[in-house]
Amino acid sequence: MESQVLPLIHQSVERFQAGDLATAETLLKQVLQIDPRNFAGLHVMGLVHVIQKNHEEAETFLRQAVDVNPSSGLANYNLAIALSGAGKEHDALPVHARTVALAPNNQDAWVNYGKSLSALKRHEDALVCYDKALEINPEHVAALGNRGALLAELGRNEEALVCFEKVMALDAAHPAVWLNIANVLRNLKRYDEALEHYDHAIKLDQKNADLWSNKANALRNLRRYDEALEHYDRAIRLAPENGDAWYNKGYTLTGLKRHDEALAHYARAIELSPDKADVWYIMGNTLIELKQHEEAIASFDRALQINPDHEFLFGDRLSARMTICDWQDAEAQFAELAKQIENDKKPCTPFTVLSVLDSPALQKKAAISYAQNFPANHSIGATHKRSPTGMIRIGYFTKDFHEHATSFLTAELFELHDKSKFEIIAISYGPEKFDKMRVRLLQAFDQFVDVREKTDREIAQLSREMGIDIAVDMQGYQTEHRPGIFACRAAPIQVNFLAYPGTMGAEYMNYLIADSTVVPEAHRQHFTEKIVYLPDTYQPNDRKRAIANRQFTREELGLPQSGFVFCCFNNNYKITPSVFDVWMRILKEVKGSVLWLLEDNASATRNLRAEAEKRGVSGERLVFAKFTSHADHLARHRVADLFLDTLPYNAHTTASDALWAELPVLTCTGQSFTSRVAASLLKAIDLPELITASATDYEHLAIELATQSDKLLAIKQKLASKRMTAPLFDAPRYTRNLEAAYSTMYERYQSHLPPDHIVIAKM
C-alpha cells in the first residue's frame, strides 16, 4: 500500500504547491481510496478545500487528519483556520488552544487565536495572544496590525497608532498601512495629518474606492464639504456597489441640510447593504428633519431589528414617537430607557432623558456616557493665563443668534452688559439669517464672529487667540450641538448656560448657571459642573419682546365663543400620557372648557384627539394653534385663561412668554432641573401660589381656578402688577447678577483657585 501511496502523495503535494488544485485533489482522492486514514492525504486535501474556501469540507478532512495524528501542531493549526473560515469561532477556540500548546513558538498560531477571540468580543484575551506573538517576534506584521485594529476598535487610538507606526516601519509600501494610520489619526481628530496619510495611500493605489471614501470622511470632518462630495463621487465611480460610499455621501448631504438628496443616497446604500443598521438609523434622523415622523419611526424600527443595541437608536425612536404623541406602550418604553441607562448602555442622547425621565441621577449618567463621544482634546496644548487687564472677555457660543427662543431670552442681556468691565463676543456657528433679531444682536456685541465653516478645534484655537477668558456654551446638548469646541478648551473658564437645562457630564465644563429652585443644594451631586446660584432665577428675559397690538377673537383662533380656555404652548414632545390624563380629568370637571395646544405636526394633532376620545373627552375640545410670528403669538395668549404646564419637561421660554403676556402659568415641580424651571420663574415674579408639588394638587388647583373666577382674577391682577417690578423681567438686575458670577469665576481663576460652587447674594 505504501508503495502505491507515496508517489501519489509526492505528486499531489507538488501540484498543490504549484497551485494546480484540481489535479492535486484528483491525486488525493486516489490516495484516500487506497488509504482512507492517510494523514498526509487527509491534511493536504483539507488544505485544498481551505484555499478553495470550501470550509465545511476542509473541516471534515482536517478533523480526520487530527484524529489520525492529534499531536500534529500543523494539522490543528489548519483545522482552526477552517473553523474560523466557516464562522465557527467558538469551535475554533479549543483547537487554537491545542495548537499553541503543541507549537508555542508558532507566531501565526497566536495571531489566529487572537483573531478568533476578538471576533467573539473577548478583546483582552485577544490582546494577550497578539502580545504572545510579538514576544516571539516583535516585528510580526500581522500581530502588530491586528493588535492595532483591535485597539482602535476599543477606542485606544494612541496605542493603536504605535502599533500601526511599527507596521509602517516594516512595510511602508502597502496602502493599507497608510490607511490604518490615517483612520486612527482621524479618530484622534488629527484631521490634517490624516489627510496626508490618505493622500499617500491613494498614491500607492489610486483605484481603491475605500481610500477615496475615507479621505472624504476626513474632509467632511474639516468641514470641507465640496471637496468631500467630490471624493465620495470618485469612490462611487470606482466602486458603484460600495454601499459605505453612498452612505457617507448621504451623511454629508444631511449635514448640509440637503435632506432629499441625502435620502436618495441612503436608499441606494440600503439596496446594496440592506442589513446595515447605521444606514437605517441616519435615514430615520434625516426623515425627522423633513418632518416625516412616521416614516422615520419605520426606519428606526428596521434599524432596531438589525441591531437592538445600536447607540442612541432606542432614544431617537422614542423621541420621534413622542413628537407625534404616539404613546403605545409609552410607560414601558420609559422604564426600558431607564433600565438601559442604569445598565451602562447608551440608548439615547441626553436631551431625550430630560423630556421623559424626572431623574437627575439618570440624566447625569446619560450625560457622562454621551460626553465620552467628545473627550478632552489636548492637541492644541494647555490654555495660558492672560494677565488681568480690567476687562473680562466673555465669549457666547451658539448657533441660535437669530429669531429663536434662546435669543428671545438673552437679547437685552447682551445689550445691558457693562462694556466698561466686560467685552462680549458672539461666536456664531449657526445659519446666516439676517432677521430683525440678528440685526439687533450684531449691534449688541463688541464682536460678532461667524465660525460656521470652522472645525471645533479651529474655533477653540480662535477663541484662545482672541483672549476669551470665559467661554459660555449656549447650546449644550440641544440640536446641532458642538461640545467638541469646549473639549478643545476654548477658554480657561467654560460655562454651561441657559439652553441645556442639565449637566453636560464633561469634566472640561466648569460651571452651570442655576438658582436654588432648579438645583437645590442637595441636588448638586447630580451635576459634574460647579453650580453658580443666581439670586432670583437662572433665566434671563428680554423686556423688549414685542407683543402685537392685534386683538385676536376666539373665532379666528378656532376657539369656542364661550367656555374656559386652558392652554399649553409647549412642544408636543413634552406632553406625556400621565400629564394628558390629568388634563383630560380637568376638562371633564370644567364643563364647556377647551384645551388649546400648539400644532406641531398633523400626526400629533390626530393622535392627541384620539387619546382624548379614549379618555372620554371629545377630540373637538382640543384646539390647535398654528405657528405665527412671535409678536402675534404673544398677543394671542390674551385669549387664554390659564396655561397648564407639562412634567417632567416644564415650560421654559414658553412660560416666560405666557407670564410676559400676563397669562398665569400653573406648574407642578419634579426632581430635575427641567421639571423645576416654571417654579423658578413663578417665584421670581412672586406667584408661588401657582406652584404645586403633586399631580393631584395640580389638578385640583386647575379646576379651582377655572371654576372660581374671583380667585383667578386676583392672580391675574397680581401678575399684571408684578410684571414690571418683580425680578423675573428686571433685565438690568439679572445682568448685574450674572456679571457678578462671571467676576467671581474670573477672580478665582486669577487667584489660582479651582472652580467651586458660587452663590451670588441678592442686590
Image: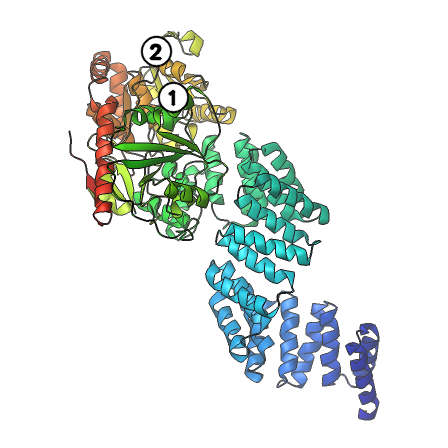
Residue closest to the eye, 728 or 301: 728
Does the CB distance between marks 1 and 2 fall below 8 Å? no
- Residue 66 pos. (x, y %): 65, 81
Residue under the point 69% across and 81% down: 65
Residue closest to the eye, 608 or 516: 516
Kind of residue at disc 1: Arg
Which of the 4 quarters of the picture holds residue 442? top left
Residue under label 1, please give it: 440
Q: Earlier in the sequence, mark 1 or mark 2?
A: 1
Q: Quadrant of the N terminus?
A: bottom right
Local SS, label 1: helix
Residue under label 2, please give it: 563
Q: Quadrant of the C terminus?
A: top left
- Identify the colour scheme used: rainbow
Kind of residue at disc 2: Gly
Residue 577 vs 240, above or below: the answer is above
Label 1: few (<14), some (14–19) or many (≥20) C-alpha neighbours in 10 Å: some
Label 2: few (<14), some (14–19) or many (≥20) C-alpha neighbours in 10 Å: some
Classify residue 10 as left or right of residue 663: right
